[in-house]
């Protein structure tokens, strides 16, 4: 039987977030969608870029986003979602074995 | 990343107001401010069972003793998967885990000789959602006291119009946008640690 303790090294935050966020729409997506489960590193430099560089970035978007404030707002939200995943993973710990045994021995009485 | 790519990971189906509420609660959680809201009353009375719903009428079986209990449980199945509006060749079962009152849980630990400081430390961890196999649910006044859900004690039952109708007669709560995200992340962490550290070479 495999026994692996919780650690941040065996977990991909991005994958979890992607799964969680798309859970309600996964049934409507094509197979190619899954290729985006691994989110590439976001270049922070985009926010330090000159106006022309930002325009270049926006010109490559495939949607009608033409407003930098929308872009920044989305990025902020994206980072926030990522932060809750990281926060949960960083906090993660296994159940104390003594407590786990108490639960197991008495579970039927708990419910 | 392109703007359109980022949008794939954002809840664009929500109104601006709902998004703001969701992200405010995310910030609170990350900042250890426990005033975030995990319940909504907006969906009260709806005829759908939602993922994360707390329902009072679930059946739990203890096969070794041949006993059955009816007790509150939390729906783990995806909302669409158990929607009766979706026709399926193979009918789906509803997956759920028992909801246990936190006070009862603490009593059990005390009666089994756990020291008070160790219990307090453990309960702090539970409330901060640190334990991967336990989903903590705060008090919802008038509906449910502080409780815990054991994600490794999953049961399943038949999903039919009769069952759904019966279960919905006693819905305790529905999770808010934030509560739902929190549950999905907890489930994801509990079940899908992809790099488990085990070499699974075929030969």
Image (cartoon, coloured by chain):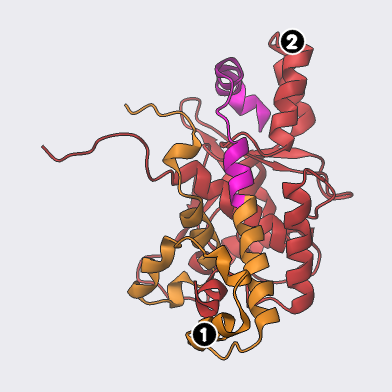
Q: In this view, does B36 lie to the left or right of A9?
A: right
Is residue B200 among the parts visible in the rendering? yes
Label total for image:
2
Q: In this view, does A43 lie above or below B98?
A: below
Q: In this view, does A85 lie to the left or right of B136?
A: left
Q: Is mark 2 on a helix, strand or loop?
A: loop
The letter of the red chain is B
The letter of the orange chain is A
> Could you classify mark 1 by the number of other residues whose Cα lies within 10 Å: few (under 14), some (14-19), or many (20 or more)?
few
Query: In the rendered structure, the residue with mark 2 lies on which chain?
Result: B
Secondary structure mainly formed by the magenta segment? helix
For the record, the magenta segment spans: A85-111
Closest to the observer: B95 or A6? A6
Closest to the observer: B202 or A77? A77
Residue at 66 percent across and 50 percent down: it is B57
**Residue on which the image places disc 1:** A56
Which image quarter: residue B60?
top right
Residue at 70 percent across and 8 percent down: it is B113
The spot of residue B12 in percent (x, y) is 63, 77
The spot of residue A72 in percent (x, y) is 66, 73
Which image quarter: residue A98?
top right
Please identify the quadrant where the C terminus of chain B is shown.
top left
Is there one chain holding both mark 2 and mark 1? no
Is residue B173 among the parts visible in the rendering? no
**Residue on which the image places disc 2:** B115
């Amino acid at each position: 039987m495999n026994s692996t303790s919780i650690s941040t090294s065996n977990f991909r935050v991005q994958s979890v977030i992607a799964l969680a966020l798309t859970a309600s729409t996964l049934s409507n997506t094509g197979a190619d969608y899954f290729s985006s489960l691994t989110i590439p590193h976001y270049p922070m430099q985009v926010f330090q870029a000159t106006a022309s560089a930002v325009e270049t970035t926006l010109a490559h978007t495939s949607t009608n986003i033409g407003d930098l404030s929308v872009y920044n707002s989305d990025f902020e939200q994206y980072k926030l979602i990522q932060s809750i995943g990281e926060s949960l993973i960083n906090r993660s710990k296994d159940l104390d074995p003594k407590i786990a045994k108490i639960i197991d021995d008495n579970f039927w009485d708990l419910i | 990343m392109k703007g359109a790519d980022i949008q794939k990971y954002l809840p664009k189906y929500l109104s601006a107001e709902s998004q703001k509420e969701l992200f405010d609660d995310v910030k609170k959680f990350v900042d250890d401010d426990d005033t975030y809201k995990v319940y909504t009353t907006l969906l009260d009375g709806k005829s759908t069972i939602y993922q994360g719903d707390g329902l009072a009428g679930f059946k739990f079986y203890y096969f070794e003793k041949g006993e059955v209990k009816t007790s509150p449980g939390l729906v783990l199945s995806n909302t669409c998967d158990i929607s009766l509006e979706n026709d399926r060749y193979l009918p789906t079962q509803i997956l759920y885990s028992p909801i246990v009152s936190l006070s009862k849980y603490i009593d059990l630990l005390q009666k089994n000789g756990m020291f008070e400081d160790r219990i307090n430390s453990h309960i702090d961890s539970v409330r901060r959602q640190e334990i991967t196999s336990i989903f903590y649910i705060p008090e919802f006044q008038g509906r449910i006291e502080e409780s815990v859900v054991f994600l490794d004690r999953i049961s399943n039952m038949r999903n039919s119009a009769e069952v759904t109708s019966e279960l919905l007669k006693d819905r305790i709560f529905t999770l808010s946008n934030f509560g739902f995200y929190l549950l999905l992340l907890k489930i994801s962490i509990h079940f899908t640690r992809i790099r488990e550290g085990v070499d699974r070479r075929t030969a």
